[in-house]
Image (tube, rainbow, N blue to C red):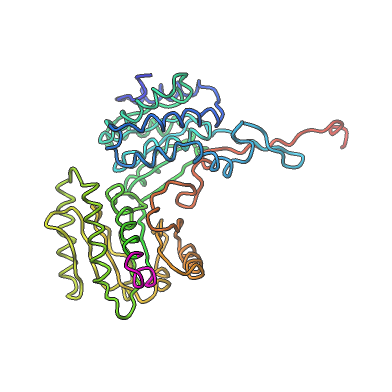
Amino acid sequence: MNDLIRNVDTPEDISAAAAELRQVGSITPNATLDVFEAWAAALGTPEMAAIPGIAFLRLWLRRNTLEPIITRELGQGALDDKWMEDGRARLKPYPVGVVAHWPAGNIEIQPLLSMTCALLGGNRCLVRIPRGLQDQTRQLIDKLVQSDSDHLVTRRIRLLVFDHERLDLHRAMAQAVDGAMIWGGEEAVTEIRALPFPHWARLAVFGPRISVAAIDAASWCVHPAVRDVFCRRIARDVWQFDQQACSSPQVLFLETSKGHPADEFVQALKLAFEAENRVHPRETIQASLTSAICQARASWLLDDVANSATFPAGPEWTILLGQGSEIQEIPRPTGGKTLTVLEVRSLLEAVGKLDGNVQTLGLAMVSAEMEATLASVAAFRGVDRIVPLGRMHVFTPPWDGVDLIRIMVRMVRHVRLTPGSAMEE
């Protein structure tokens, strides 16, 4: 199975790969889960630990993570490929067919995370691998090959490497499939959605969105130890994926209280950032990101004399502090571990200004009643995930408000004939 990752150069290469996949028979979710469980174990080696997001991929692949998701999305009988009774009818999930995957180029594990969602629905997968992710993907796939001695899963996938500029290859991939999962920035998503998919193809689009965090005054003003715990959780969410994921917090709404200046919180957050940076230092950084971080620091300080910023001499991390009560829109994200902390009088007021561009809200609140109220307001404003701080990247469907396995499954309904029904007319 050493041809799973292929450098393709012609549309015929892609058509041939899709034709190969169409010859592959069905597989039960239970059989797929057995392979995924072995794959998760194989990924737990020291050499794999350096791949960003590997801990989340391993957790996602575990049977005890996926079994409840499959049951919830596809029904009780789905694990064993059984029909489910529904009155005189019966229901059973069937795959869409061959599903294409266009992952974003900045999340190392995303090509395979996307692929697993379609595989769990019984589909076969064509996955475009951005050239920048080729080496990491090969490392991850090698572990899958080792774990799948009977080729139950590996025979159902083809990973295709080609340049973003090759529109002819993108078109060929779109024409060859029955569904697609599309991830990435606005420009990339728009280009891929415009490709000539078959009219029956099912598309799942996960475009560019941002995420924010919020902490109420009671969570940080009363007990310094509790405040420090939340600061460590915020740092953990910022560090994962170098703040490039849609679930990465870009802004923190900080509810203030008389006698507790925001600077007090920022100093605690500074210590948490420094500690996280010692444990997980950035190994490399693009010159363009360094420039963007420097520009964001300077612009923030020049825009308003009341603004302040805390950061080391280098571009390792940045905390920007300012007033948020009068702000009408979320500041443009910088990334690169740059967190904008906005002081607000009320979290309800701040969350009430959110829109559908916000994917995840990470929360720290003392009052369960106020948390429930805030969650309802956020959901009404378009937020799809409301989670505790420290868990903003936990990959559990629904994602962007939709189920990840169900979206690439056809639920077939069979209304059974009864004896003598032909004579009832």
**In this orientation, which residue lies closer to the viewer: 258 or 227?**
227
Q: Please identify the quarter of the rendering in which residue 214 is found.
A: bottom left
Q: Who's the residue at 17% across and 75% down the image?
A: 305
Relative placement, left or right, of 69 versus 271 is right
Specify the principal SS of the magenta part: helix
Q: Who's the residue at 40% across and 43% down the image?
A: 193
User: Looking at the rendering, in which quadrant would you find the N terminus?
Assistant: top left
Q: Residue furthest bottom?
A: 258
45 versus 72 height, above or below = above
Q: Please identify the quarter of the rendering in which residue 219 is found.
A: bottom left
Q: Is residue 225 magenta?
A: yes
How far across and how far down the image is residue 173, in percent? 39, 31
Q: State which region is magenta.
A: 216-226
Number of numbered tags placed on the structure image: 0
Relative placement, left or right, of 251 versus 155 is left
Q: Is residue 309 magenta?
A: no
283 versus 158 height, above or below = below
How far across and how far down the image is residue 366, in percent? 44, 68
User: Looking at the rendering, in which quadrant would you find the C terminus?
Assistant: top right
**In this orientation, which residue lies closer to the viewer: 56 or 260?**
260
How far across and how far down the image is residue 320, in percent? 22, 65
